[in-house]
Amino acid sequence: MSYDNHTPDSRFRSLIDRFGFPHLLTVTLALVATTILLGIAAKATGSGLACEANWPQCDAGPFNLFPANLPSFYEWFHRFVSMFAGFAIIGSAIAAWRLPDIDRNVAGLVVLGMVLTPVQVALGRETVTTYTMDILSLHFWTAVTIFTLFLVATVLVWAHRLTSRHVVAALVLGLVALPVHVTLSPVVGSELSSYSPTMQMAQYGVTLVLLGAAIVAAMVGRRRLTGRAVVPLLAAPPIVIAVLFFGRQAINPALEVPYLVAVAVSLVTFLAGLVLTRSADTSGDDAGALSP
């Protein structure tokens, strides 16, 4: 009996063909985002050390593999989901590297995300065994970097289906997300005690949406639009990063003003991008209507 038609490479390719590499990247991106939010929940509830500083074990069950209480569960579940995110990252990188029809830019982004993953795992261990604010911050920003790499790669693989209408949708989503972000921040709560774990997790969820909207608008706008309309779109992502940076520090009253300034600049940028994008769409429609 011959197995020539059932080599590991052919089975691997068949699996990707059925599932679809863009879908694999999308699922991986969702798992990375979920891992970030669960990490925020663990930090916000003070559960980062709930497993009695055990890593990768916890504080109950056989070999301390399971959580003993609700705080431990937050930390344990964060690790549990991050394990699957890690597997998805590795699988995406292997697929991107081995499939000949995957754009090399996409492959490079995904492989870089895979390279950063063990660094992120090591930082996660340090947040338990050492637990300093510098390590926590580095752990968070490494996670955001991985999220951004996979977001950019995901936009690239879906780019052929994305149009200027998606740019408009992303900008509208960003405009909605900005006031929600401020409402959930400690700037509005006025007291740190009112900045609950639920508000923190919700705010970071909105932050990822805001960052995603800015990146989608910039990448798709750069491909589909020309002229002035592209300028505010390209400016949006770095300005949103400033919102994210100062938003994390906004519990410090001295940084409330820079945070609000970054939000205001983002708002103006999104509005300008929306007006110019819609204007470019209208001009394109008029030109199409007038053409013979």
Image (cartoon, rainbow, N blue to C red):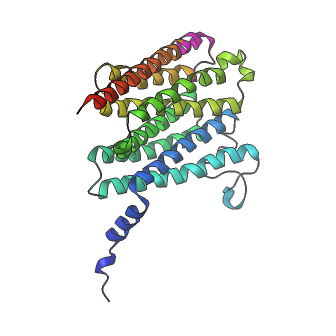
Magenta residues span: 248-260
The image position of residue 92, as x and y in percent, is 40, 53
Q: Does residue 221 lie above or below 123 as drawn? A: above
Q: Residue furthest left?
A: 292
Q: Does residue 46 lie above or below 29 as drawn? A: above
Q: Does residue 30 lie above or below 165 as drawn? A: below
The image position of residue 245, as x and y in percent, is 51, 23
Please state which of residues 210 and 200 is positioned toward the viewer in this rendering. Answer: 210
Q: Is residue 16 magenta?
A: no
Q: Quadrant of the C terminus?
A: top left
Left or right for 180, reference 17:
right
Please state which of residues 206 and 198 is positioned toward the viewer in this rendering. Answer: 206
**Residue occupying the point 57% across, 28% down:** 133
The image position of residue 209, as x and y in percent, is 53, 33
**Residue occupying the point 58% across, 50% down:** 81
Left or right for 163, reference 213:
left
Residue 18 in which image quadrant: bottom left
**Residue occupying the point 62% across, 15% down:** 252
Q: Quadrant of the N terminus?
A: bottom left
Please state which of residues 93 and 154 is positioned toward the viewer in this rendering. Answer: 154
The image position of residue 152, as x and y in percent, is 39, 39
Please state which of residues 45 and 26 is positioned toward the viewer in this rendering. Answer: 26
Residue 260 in which image quadrant: top right
